[in-house]
Amino acid sequence: MVDNLAVALFHIKVILAGDGTVGKSCLLRRYVFNDFVEKHNMTIGMDSHTKLTKVPGLGPVKIHTWDLAGQPQWSVVRETFYLGSHAMALVFDVNNLDSIRHLPDWVSECRGKAGAIPVLVVANKTDLPCRVPVDKIAKWAKDNNYEYIETSPKTGYNVSAMFEKLGTMGGELCPQEPLGAVKTWARRSASTLPPEIITPTLRPAGPTISEKRLPEPLPRSAQPGFSAVITKFHRLDHLSITDQ
């Protein structure tokens, strides 16, 4: 255990994205506080926590986790929170078919703002009976060069492993920080992104966030295998998974 925050040389920003109620906040709470609340209040806009940990190959790092509200009414607000991210956890609920169908839209939204950052697909709430074929989502993730992990914030299963993996993935993009540089971390991270994906709030002139249109979703054909998976899911309206 690292007990001195000043020793961290890497400050890694990770995003938790996915539909509302898939358990993002519970994952973060389990990781930061090592507890679980059965009934969790809806995230309003964004919640964030920072934790010092050790990541293999990087040593002590600060992982800054931003938990984004998943409801549609927060889509414009979310735009500003992607900036400067180093990795994204794309969370879905193994009992919620819609949360799976929306995965490509979340990838499009995030990468439209943060660039081609690494993605970790998270099959969450695995302590409950699984009602969707997660093996096919795992294959979709692999086909798109995304990492994949299964978690349960209720039992703690794989939660620490999930954040350690995010730290490793984000560390590949995160420049080493001199001590005391945390205040400039977000600004400098943003400056490394291509100009076309820097949000308007960092530009001297241009449209405001409310005036800026959301990025067009990526065509499903751009994400190999997803259309076939979703076509199969549409036949699972009664969640009776019999064909393989």
Image (cartoon, helix red, strand yellow):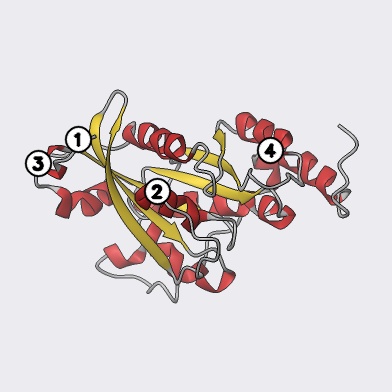
Q: Residue furthest top?
A: 57
Q: Tell me, yes or no, whether the two marked residues, 3 and 1, touch with CB atoms within 8 Å.
A: no
Question: Percent from the top left, x then y, of residue 195?
Answer: 34, 51
What's the amino acid at mark 1? Gln
Tag 3 residue: 179
Q: CA distance from mark 4 to mark 3?
A: 40 Å
Q: CA distance from mark 3 to mark 1?
A: 9 Å
Q: Secondary structure at mark 2?
A: loop
Q: Tell me, yes or no, whether the two marked residues, 4 and 3, touch with CB atoms within 8 Å.
A: no
Q: Earlier in the sequence, mark 4 or mark 3?
A: 4
Q: Residue at x 55, y 74 (%)?
A: 73
Q: CA distance from mark 2 to mark 4?
A: 28 Å
Q: Residue at x 11, y 39 (%)?
A: 178
Q: Earlier in the sequence, mark 2 or mark 4?
A: 2
Q: CA distance from mark 3 to mark 2?
A: 28 Å
Q: Which mark is residue 137?
A: 4
Q: Earlier in the sequence, mark 3 or mark 2?
A: 2
Nearest to viewer (mark 3 / mark 1): 3
Tag 2 residue: 34
State which quadrant residue 58 falls in.
top left
Q: Residue at x 36, y 52 (%)?
A: 33
Q: Earlier in the sequence, mark 2 or mark 1?
A: 2
What's the amino acid at mark 4? Ile
Tag 1 residue: 176
Taking the image as shown, residue 105 lies to the left or right of residue 45, namely: right
Please say if 22 is above or below 5.
below
Q: CA distance from mark 4 to mark 1?
A: 34 Å
Quadrant assignment for the C terminus: top right
Q: Secondary structure at mark 1?
A: loop
Taking the image as shown, residue 104 lies to the left or right of residue 51, namely: right
Q: Tell me, yes or no, whether the two marked residues, 2 and 4, touch with CB atoms within 8 Å.
A: no
What's the amino acid at mark 2? Asn
